[in-house]
């Protein structure tokens, strides 16, 4: 550890700003485009401890947002922005758990629910809600908001955007028209501050999964809105109302989003006056960090990160993440050869060279999709799993066996200008005879064009960030497309895998469950849904005036960073 680099334990805490729970926030565009001037610290105050005041400026790693409802949230950059505003009933296990063995212990962090009673393990819960919580518009938070949020999340026109909550009893019987609240029999209001939730079947990681759609939205904003209009409903899509420690004041699309302190926050008055999220490209963010115009920046390119580390006014942190980076061939365009193409990439790309160029060797080469889950021995690859070491001759043989046209150019869809990693991958692919041509999408168009319209031959994406065992199934389950409430964007399907995965999700014996999950891994190995290359590494640069950026909590149990505890040191 260098003088200016935090400890490994703090690395995990640093990850918090990059792994905030699923929540959403935004603001109605203001007429002017200049970001508010950050509020300066009181110069007369000399205190060693936390100081109130000041505005934190963050570059979350995103260039654009088009919709700010929780049902449209996709990607870590969104989570970084939304977590100070919209909250959930509880937060479950998240990235930190990949480094600490999980147990059968029921582990959650209460948020809008102050207490959870387990009526039937892994199937029925009673949530006791916090009282005296207010929405940002001053209206009280009650059980009606929870009931509305659960129902909205199960409606087909909402679920297709977010994955929904199909596990709730009655959710699958709502029909094409979405049904009514009464049809969702697993959701029950007991009184104004108590709700009961019942699933159709046992699901041992439903509550502890950060992917559970437990984000709560205000019923009074939506009660007169048709369900098929909810996702894009204004003013919420542009001016959401949450219960978090900060509330929006101004948004200028593609430029910045400003938040101010919520003085009525149930968790106590935040220390910061406000937060400004600036939507900057990498080079602009690096320049702003250098000049002291930006407080926090995420994952700059390696060369910039190393240069910034040496600056006296900046601190740095690197931290492991469970997320693996994978490259995906469009199954719809290559239905008969996608598996072989994924294999060829895994053999033909010199991943060690790739990681040396892009991460300085900090990231870990890893092709096993469950290596980050510390349940029993699941993080240990099963016997028989293919070890994809660099073997260009084998890659060439695979391509020749499928009669690959080496003159063909594959469209490599990217968000904004290609990154160093994408350019490096393109060059290494050329070494194995694959021609990749960048197809550049504006950040606001990337998700709808690539994920919804499948406009790509190949693209890269981060996966596996969740430690919930069922998360990967949502990516690969037959028919689990966005239209069906899943996140199987690429229309992958392996019926045998589904059968084994279903058995694993119902198995209560831990050792037997692990063995079934390893069978799933072997089935994926035989029919690759993508080409996973390495586990990621997070890089964080922040101004030395920023204090308590690492929450003083067990991050493994808390997915939302307590932004209300961050403060700015007087300079």
Image (cartoon, rainbow, N blue to C red):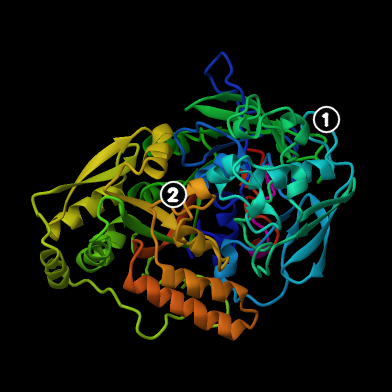
545 to 14, vertically: above or below: above
Give the residue displayed 49% in from the left and 63% down from the top.
472
Q: Quadrant of residue 476?
A: bottom left
410 to 496, vertically: above or below: above
Q: Quadrant of residue 11?
A: bottom right
Name the disc covering residue 299, or none.
Answer: 2
* Residue 430 coordinates in the image, percent (x, y): 15, 54
Q: Is residue 557 magenta?
A: yes
Categorize mark 1 by other alpha carbons within 10 Å: few (<14), some (14-19), many (20+).
few
**Which of the two labelled residues, at mark 2 and mark 1, occupies the earlier sequence position?**
1
Drawn side of residue 102 relative to residue 116, left or right = left
Drawn side of residue 36 relative to residue 476, left or right = right
SS for dot 2: loop
Give the Cα separation between the discs numbered 2 and 1.
37 Å
In the image, 259 versus 173, the foreground residue is 173
Q: Residues at badges 2 and 1 in contact (C-beta under 8 Å)?
A: no
Q: Is residue 445 magenta?
A: no
* Residue 357 coordinates in the image, percent (x, y): 28, 57
Residue found at the very far top of the displayed protein: 31
Categorize mark 2 by other alpha carbons within 10 Å: few (<14), some (14-19), many (20+).
some
Q: Which residue is mark 1?
A: 138
In the image, 454 versus 18, the foreground residue is 454
Quadrant (top left/top right/bottom left/bottom right) for the C terminus: top right
Residue 544 can be seen in this image: no
Give the residue displayed 75% in from the left and 72% down from the top.
121
* Residue 259 coordinates in the image, percent (x, y): 65, 31
* Residue 289 coordinates in the image, percent (x, y): 47, 38
Residue found at the very far right of the displayed protein: 191
Residue range in magenta is 556-568
């Amino acid at each position: 550890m260098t003088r200016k680099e935090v400890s490994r334990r703090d690395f995990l805490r640093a990850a918090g700003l990059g792994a905030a729970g699923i929540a959403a926030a935004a603001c109605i565009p203001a007429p002017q485009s200049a970001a508010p001037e950050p509020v300066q610290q009181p110069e007369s105050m000399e205190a060693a401890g936390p100081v109130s005041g000041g505005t934190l400026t963050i570059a979350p790693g995103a260039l654009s947002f088009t919709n700010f409802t929780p049902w449209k949230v996709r990607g870590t950059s969104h989570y970084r922005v939304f977590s100070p505003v919209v909250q959930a009933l509880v937060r479950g296990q998240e990235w930190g758990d990949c480094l600490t063995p999980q147990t059968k212990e029921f582990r959650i962090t209460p948020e809008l629910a102050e207490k959870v009673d387990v009526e039937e393990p892994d199937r029925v819960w009673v949530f006791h809600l916090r009282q005296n919580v207010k929405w940002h518009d001053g209206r009280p938070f009650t059980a009606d908001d929870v009931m509305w949020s659960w129902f909205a999340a199960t409606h087909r026109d909402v679920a297709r955007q977010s994955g929904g909550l199909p596990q709730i009893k009655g959710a699958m019987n709502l029909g094409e028209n979405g049904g009514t609240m009464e049809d969702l029999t697993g959701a029950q209001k007991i009184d104004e501050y108590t709700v009961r939730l019942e699933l159709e079947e046992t699901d041992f990681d439903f509550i502890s999964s950060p992917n559970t759609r437990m984000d709560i939205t205000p019923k009074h904003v939506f009660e007169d809105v048709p369900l098929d209009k909810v996702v894009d409903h204004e003013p919420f899509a542009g001016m959401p109302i949450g219960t978090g420690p900060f509330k929006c004041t101004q948004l200028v699309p593609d430029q910045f989003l400003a938040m101010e302190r919520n003085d009525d926050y149930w968790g106590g008055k935040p220390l910061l006056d406000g937060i400004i999220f600036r939507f900057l490209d990498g080079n602009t963010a690096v320049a702003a960090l250098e000049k002291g115009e930006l407080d926090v920046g995420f994952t700059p390119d390696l060369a910039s990160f190393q240069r910034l580390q040496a600056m006296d006014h900046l601190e740095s942190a690197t931290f492991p993440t469970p997320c693996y980076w994978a490259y995906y061939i469009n199954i719809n365009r290559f239905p008969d050869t996608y598996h072989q193409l994924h294999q060829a990439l895994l053999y033909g790309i010199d991943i060690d060279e790739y990681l040396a160029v892009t991460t300085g060797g900090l990231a870990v080469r890893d092709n096993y999709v469950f290596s980050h889950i510390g349940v029993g021995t699941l993080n240990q690859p099963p016997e028989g799993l293919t070890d994809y070491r660099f073997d260009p001759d084998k890659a060439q043989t695979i391509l020749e066996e499928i009669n690959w046209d080496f003159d063909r150019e594959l469209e490599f869809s990217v968000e904004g200008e290609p990154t160093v990693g994408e350019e490096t991958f393109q060059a290494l692919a050329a070494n194995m005879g694959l021609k990749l041509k960048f197809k550049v999408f504006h950040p606001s168009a990337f998700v709808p064009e690539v994920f919804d319209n499948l406009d790509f031959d190949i693209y890269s994406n981060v996966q596996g960030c969740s430690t919930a065992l069922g998360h990967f199934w949502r990516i690969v389950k037959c028919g689990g497309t966005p239209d069906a409430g899943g996140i199987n964007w690429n229309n992958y399907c392996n019926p045998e895998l589904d059968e084994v995965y279903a058995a694993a999700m119902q198995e209560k014996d831990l050792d037997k469950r692990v063995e079934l999950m390893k069978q799933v891994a072997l089935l994926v190995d035989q029919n690759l849904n993508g080409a996973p290359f390495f586990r990621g590494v997070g890089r964080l640069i922040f101004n030395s005036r920023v204090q308590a950026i690492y929450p003083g909590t067990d991050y493994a149990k808390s997915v939302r960073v307590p932004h209300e505890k961050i403060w700015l040191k007087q300079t």
